Amino acid sequence: VTGLSTRHLGERFQHSNGTISHYFRAVLNTVSSSPFYNKYVHLPSEMSPIPVEIQSNPKFFPYFQGALGAIDGSHIACCPSALERELSRNRK
């Protein structure tokens, strides 16, 4: 179901776009909430070894060799002040 629009999901599961959007936000908020995130998401430390699945696969390792950390697809939670909020919006 990944990569589909709300309209396509609504058609596929025979529910309104509002219902699909409501439950998508509910799941997203739950998964990104502090209790769930802190319990189930464990980021590797700087000293963590590169997994063997990546290191031994020539399809992946050339791209991760010498990498310092994840950039694309990373989400950094921040709470800027009202004055700094506009500066932090849509930054990658």
Image (spheres, rainbow, N blue to C red):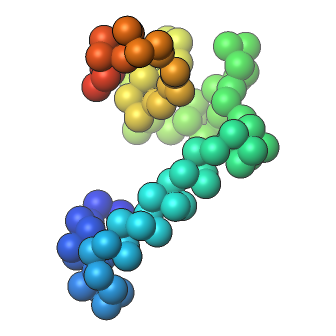
Instruction: Note whether 15 is above or below 36 in the view shown.
Output: below
Instruction: Point out residue 40 in the picture as x, y percentages from the top left corner.
Output: 73, 46
Image vertical order of residue 74 relative to residue 41, above or below: above
Q: Residue at x 55, y 36 (%)?
A: 54
- Residue 76 seen in the current view: yes
Q: If the image is split into quadrants, where does the C terminus sit?
A: top left
- Residue 7 vertical position relative to residue 76 in the rendered view, above or below: below
Q: Residue at x 65, y 36 (%)?
A: 52
Q: Is residue 32 left or right of residue 17?
A: right
Identify the residue at horizontal 42%, vertical 23% (top origin): 71
Look at the image and tell me in which quarter the N terminus lies: bottom left
Left or right position of 42 against 9: right
- Residue 76 position within the rendered picture, expressed as x and y whole percent measured from the top left: 51, 25
Residue occupying the point 73% across, 14% down: 47
The x, y position of residue 13, in whole percent, is 35, 87
Residue lying furthest right? 39
**Residue 7: quarter of image:** bottom left
